[in-house]
Image: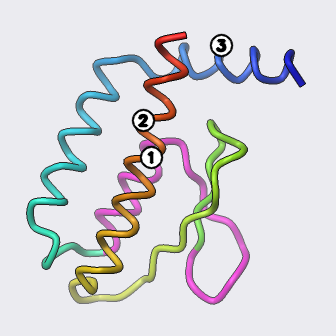
Amino acid sequence: MVKRSILICDIIRDIMNKQKLGKLKRRLNQLRGRRGNIRSRELVKLAQALGRKRSKRGDEPTYVSVRLPYSLPISIPDHPKGMNPYVAGNILDALEKDILELEEMLSD
């Protein structure tokens, strides 16, 4: 278990750095600023940038983290129009948790 944790940390440091995380955090805050008009594709792009891949489970498209294997999957509804502000807020909260966990792993 410890070896796997160390391996994941090494992979994360190779792929993700503080500058990339800062950029993703700014993008997340921009989306949070306009919570009433967020499209699903914007959230999907952010989720993929944080290392989440689409999984084949559930009715809605679900994204699981490759970089953080113990994080919960996130469902991002695929609607052509803007997303419900509360749903978008919950998804942004989950993605922000990913950013915080990645920052913690980078600082170790």
Q: Which residue is mark 1?
A: 97
Q: Which residue is mark 3?
A: 10
* Discs 3, 1 touching: Cβ within 8 Å: no
Q: Which residue is mark 2?
A: 100
Other residues around mark 3 within 10 Å, as few (<14) / some (14–19) / many (≥20): some
Q: Which residues are magenta?
A: 40-61
From the viewer's side, name the closer residue of 42 and 86: 86
| Amino acid at pointer 1 | Lys
3D distance between C-alphas at marks 2 and 1: 5 Å
Residue at (26%, 28%) from the top-left corner?
Answer: 22
3D distance between C-alphas at marks 3 and 1: 20 Å
Residue at (55%, 66%) from the top-left corner?
Answer: 74
Residue 82 picture location, percent across and down? 21, 84
Residue 24 picture location, percent across and down? 29, 38
3D distance between C-alphas at marks 3 and 2: 17 Å
Q: Is residue 76 left or right of residue 53?
A: left
* Comes first in the chain, label 3 or label 1: 3
Residue at (24%, 50%) from the top-left corner?
Answer: 28
Residue at (32%, 26%) from the top-left corner?
Answer: 20
Q: Considering only vertical position in the picture, is 102 above or below 36? A: above
Position of the C terminus by quadrant: top right
Within the magenta stretch, is there residue 51? yes
